[in-house]
Amino acid sequence: MPLVSSGAHTGRVSTDPQFATRQIRSGYASATFQNPAVVPIYQSAAYEFESFAAARDIFALRRRGNLYSRTGNPTQTVLEERVAALDGGVAALATASGQSAVLVALLALAKNGEHLVAARQLYGGTVDLLTDTFADFGIEVTLVDQDDLEAWRAAVRPTTRAFFAESIGNPTASVLRVQEVADIAHEAGVPLVVDNTVATPVLQRPKEFGADIVVYSATKFLGGHGSSLGGVIVDLGTFDFGAEPARWPQFTQPFARVGDVVLWERFGQAGSAYLVYAKVKLVHDLGPSLSPFNSFQLIQGIETLDLRVARQSASALTVAAFLDSRPEVSVVRHPGLPGDPGHEAASRYLPRGAGSVFSFDLAGGEEVVENFVDSLGLFSLVANIGDARSLVIHPATTTHSHLDDDQLRLAGFSRATIRLSIGLEDVDDLVADLARSLDLVGALDPADDAARDHDPAREPALVTD
Ligand SMILES: Cc1ncc(COP(=O)(O)O)c(C=O)c1O
């Protein structure tokens, strides 16, 4: 019996329910609880064992059961089963934040002395984690331009344990060629871990393109209302850790802290030995636990996920096209626009929409950014994405303020870059708000077509590793 939640306890959901059904029903059958129609908040730090034998068996991983809320609570279990069902995974593990989901997902694969290859087009907090804190842990990370397939291949070492990238990059909306990168990871004998936060399983199921593990900041679109932090790791059940047992001793050697059980033998691929290890060792030891209340809020959000993401994605394309038509804007980075470098990849990897987080540069440069942002009436100045509200941020002075000009350019943007996260307001109101502020900066510093044609931000980002 799997220790982490799997799609096995989906109650009244019968064979092959569609996405919209899964996002409302998976993981919960009211009859098996006290029969509330809505998933309850189980606010308890610990759980009473029905017997001495039950306690012993749950601790020994012989039996599934609630133990202590640092490693999971029943509301969280429903969330885990639901997200696993949306992604076609064998199991999921929820954590306190997206950051801890990335941390735990990768620490379960690589330890001191080992190595990761990651895209350089990543959320800034992930770059900090990989290049700074992981260095403290003795885990080396090579960052590559995700579009340079040779760079992925060249970065592989005997100690490499995973590839990591975002399906849609935050903040530049870069589009990962998932299948191509997954193929190179598999040639190297390691799994591809995809951060699917911006795409969500509505716009992309990375499993369909060869990815092995998915992570989410559930704080963003899964929750969808900007109220609760959370993270989820989904094991897609595709990577065979048993194929090269010497490379993965954490799964294939006796696990001393649980009676020398070999996780790969007990749980295997289908029972997610990978997430059992992540939960029993890493979440247990490090403590990034998701609260029952946040689990509840994230479940509520997921019930409307496809409706929200479809509308936000469509509105974002409308807004991007509008910005692209304005002389005060020098470049719009949205893969839904025909001229965008990610457009072709988006037609394969994001056929249902390219998401609602993207960026653009003001032709007037850094000098007009403050006036532009402060004059917006509807967009909220917030360091977040994926909210029902539309949000704006200036990465160079906030989320990416520790990067110098070269690092900003390598990350694919400049000091004139503004990031938007399009919410659920009426798109005409959003366009009108942006138009007013563009008129204002246009009057301050009229841009012309020459500025637009010669903007260095239109050049492709440099390649490093
Ligand atoms: C793509 C991506 N991954 C991970 C994270 C980290 O998630 P959290 O803020 O929930 O810790 C973020 C946060 O912005 C993100 O945008």
Image (cartoon, rainbow, N blue to C red):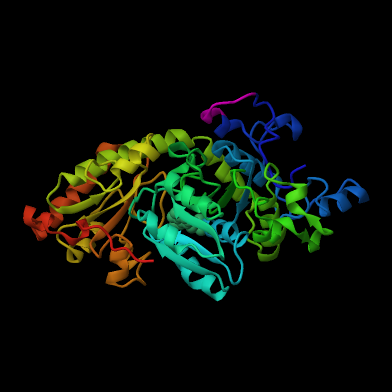
At a point 55% along the width and 75% down the height, the residue shown is 136
Question: Magenta part of the protein: which range?
Answer: 15-21
The count of marks equals 0
Whether residue 19 is in magenta: the answer is yes
The residue under the point 30% across, 61% down is 394
Q: Residue furthest top?
A: 15
Q: Quadrant of the N terminus?
A: top right
**133 left or right of 72?**
left
* Quadrant including the C terminus: bottom left
From the viewer's side, name the closer residue of 40 and 94: 94
Q: Nearer the viewer, residue 48 or 209?
A: 209
Rendered residue at 43%/44% (across/down): 199
Could you tell me if residue 228 is visible in this image? Answer: no
Query: Can residue 135 be seen from the camera position used here?
Result: yes
Left or right relative to 333: residue 59: right
Q: Position of residue 197 (x, y in %)?
A: 46, 49
Left or right: where does residue 8 sit relative to residue 195? right
Image: 348 above or below 12: below
Camera-nearest residue between 109 and 417: 109
The residue nearer to you, when weighing 416 against 256, is 256
The percent coordinates of residue 132 (x first, y second) are 48, 72
Q: Looking at the rendering, which quadrant does residue 356 occupy? A: top left
The vertical placement of 27 against 297, above or below, is above
Image position, residue 275 (x, y; %): 66, 51
Compared across the picture, whether 185 is left or right of 269 comes to left
Q: Residue furthest right?
A: 52
Please check the rendered image and state whether residue 461 is part of the magenta-colored stretch, yes or no: no
Residue 238, percent from left and from top? 59, 43
For residue 161, what is the image quadrant? bottom right
